[in-house]
Image (cartoon, helix red, strand yellow):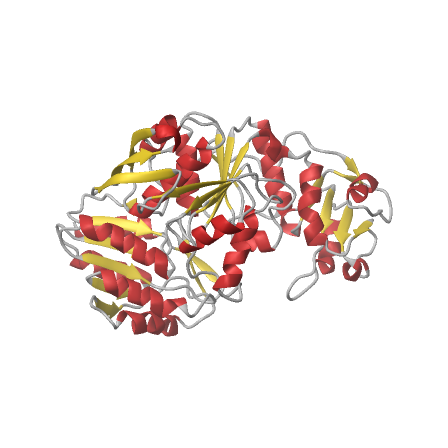
């Protein structure tokens, strides 16, 4: 089993509660010693300041008694929460969530100032870009924070959200400082920006990849989603911007941001960094990179798709702006072993190509299939579904994208969550019915993958889309073990 990295620093800070309260321009109801900060009682350790925030269905202060039993030394909350808390010193502010990020950074003595921070945002490609940034640094000590989790110096560290909540994030930054990390490449979600999880510090570089339909169950509309992303590109959050000008929202962002801007393009648009002479192959893409001041060098991206060329170019443009040698970065990217669940090739001695990808939104489905079509001699077969309790409007659009580019579309279950799986499949099938690909419905994800494996032959490409790196399937509140990669290997082996 891989050794896990600690999630709090070895050197424990020790603050008087009154001093922390003074940082927020207020006072504490009583004195206490604080040795950590926690937003969730499940992560709380003795001596922690428990951040009791108002929630959608209940107030965090209703768990203050649990926090006290677990050893919390004090509570940070709002006036409503203060009326609930008993027998613990309190610090009361009008907006405790807004205060939490700045307080967490101060508590750990601004740890992110000890290394370079690369904040990556976009609808798709964030995970791949951060992993390529890690690969680009080669043997240098680096860290990655994102959807797949946190890694510090190649060791996993427990984290749950794509962008962790501020107390956990700043504690991880403090661990990175102790581990002499040189670069932290981090996914920055729109949720994190809206909820203030990355307040309290500046990224050295903020990278914008693209924007398409996603998270419309959280944002009012696409404009609201864009403005949430755009908040990263302000002096409050970043020192410089790196922007993909092939994306219309990127071009708009270039005009909106007050930050110094470096641009990149894979599509022939004028930009500081450009990818030219792009040559796809079955395993990835070869190309030439043209940069400022006549810089030119070859780059091999070991992942299929022009969108992965864009991700790699984002890394080179971003890290070159803070002084890294772009040719060395290119060598590191070329040596990358790939990203879990992102265009991940499954090899089990089969005659056809098998790919697992996390594509779970229309633009991502289209990008993956468009990348694989030119390097597929036979049929392109895709297994696809859609998640429950999320944006309903994207389901038929995912079906449309799949049927537009694949020869065979097998519609099945993703993570139905609390919704009837059949209703979700029907919505995806509605879009897929427009063709020209043949669409079939197969309830049960394992059964659908088995159907796809049975029909795949020499020259075909089989894509299992939607869940990528995930190791479970959520149905009616229960997460059952399910890994597309493991299931594919098992089913291919059973047909060999």
In percent of the image, x 36 and y 47: which residue is there? 341
- Where residue 290 appears, x then y in whole percent? 33, 34
In percent of the image, x 60 and y 43: which residue is there? 235
Residue 169 at least partly seen: yes
Observer-nearest of 436 and 295: 295
127 in relation to 478, above or below: above
- Where residue 393 appears, x then y in whole percent? 41, 70
In percent of the image, x 42 and y 48: which residue is there? 209
Observer-nearest of 468 and 373: 373
399 in relation to 105, above or below: below
- Where residue 26 appears, x then y in whole percent? 83, 48
Observer-nearest of 175 and 404: 404
In percent of the image, x 33 and y 35: which residue is there? 337
- Where residue 239 appears, x then y in whole percent? 57, 38
Q: Is residue 199 left or right of residue 72?
A: left
60 in relation to 107, above or below: below
Residue 412 at least partly seen: no
Q: Is residue 484 left or right of residue 101?
A: left
Tally the numbered discs: 0
Observer-nearest of 196 and 165: 196
Q: Quadrant of residue 453?
A: bottom left
Locate the N terminus by quadrant.
top left
């Amino acid at each position: 089993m891989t050794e896990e990295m600690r999630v709090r620093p070895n050197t424990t800070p020790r603050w008087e509660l009154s001093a922390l309260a003074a940082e927020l321009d207020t006072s504490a109801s009583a004195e206490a010693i604080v040795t950590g900060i926690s937003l969730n009682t499940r992560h709380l350790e003795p001596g922690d300041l428990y951040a009791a925030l108002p929630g959608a269905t209940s107030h965090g202060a209703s768990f203050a008694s649990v926090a006290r039993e677990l050893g919390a030394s004090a509570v940070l909350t709002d006036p409503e929460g203060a009326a609930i808390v008993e027998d613990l010193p309190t610090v009361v502010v009008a907006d405790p969530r807004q205060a939490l990020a700045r307080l967490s950074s101060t508590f750990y003595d601004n740890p992110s100032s000890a290394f370079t921070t690369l904040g990556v945002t976009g609808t798709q490609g964030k995970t791949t870009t951060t992993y390529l940034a890690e690969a680009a640094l080669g043997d240098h000590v680096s860290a990655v924070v994102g959807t797949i989790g946190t890694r510090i110096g190649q060791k996993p560290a427990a984290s749950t959200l794509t962008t962790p909540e501020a107390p956990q994030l700043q504690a991880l930054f403090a661990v990175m400082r102790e581990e002499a990390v040189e670069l932290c490449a981090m996914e920055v979600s729109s949720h994190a920006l809206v909820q203030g999880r990355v307040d309290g510090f500046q990224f050295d570089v903020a990278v914008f990849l693209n924007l398409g339909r996603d998270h419309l169950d959280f944002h009012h509309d696409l404009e609201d989603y864009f403005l949430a992303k755009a908040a990263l590109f302000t002096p409050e959050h970043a020192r410089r911007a790196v922007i993909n000008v092939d994306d219309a929202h990127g071009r708009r962002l270039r005009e909106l941001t007050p930050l110094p801007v470096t641009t990149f393009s894979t599509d022939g648009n004028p930009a500081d960094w450009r990818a030219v002479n792009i040559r796809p192959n079955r395993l990835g893409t070869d190309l030439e990179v043209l940069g400022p001041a006549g810089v030119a060098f070859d780059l091999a991206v070991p992942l299929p798709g022009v969108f992965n060329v864009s991700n790699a170019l984002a890394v080179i443009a971003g890290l070159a702006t803070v002084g890294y040698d772009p040719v060395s970065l290119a060598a590191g990217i070329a040596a990358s072993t790939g990203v879990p669940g992102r265009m991940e090739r499954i090899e089990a001695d089969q005659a056809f190509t098998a790919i697992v990808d996390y594509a779970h939104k229309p633009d991502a489905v289209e990008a993956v299939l468009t990348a694989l079509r030119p390097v597929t001699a036979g049929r392109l077969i895709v297994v696809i579904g859609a998640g429950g309790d999320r944006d309903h409007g994207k389901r038929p659009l995912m079906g449309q994208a799949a049927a537009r580019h694949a020869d065979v579309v097998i519609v099945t279950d993703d993570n139905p969550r609390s919704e009837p799986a059949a209703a979700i499949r029907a919505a995806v099938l509605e879009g897929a019915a427009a063709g020209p690909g043949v669409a079939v419905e197969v309830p049960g994800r394992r059964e659908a993958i088995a159907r796809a494996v049975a029909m795949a032959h020499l020259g075909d490409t089989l894509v299992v889309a939607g869940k990528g790196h995930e190791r479970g399937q959520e149905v009616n509140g229960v997460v059952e073990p399910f890994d597309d990669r493991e299931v594919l290997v098992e089913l291919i082996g059973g047909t060999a």
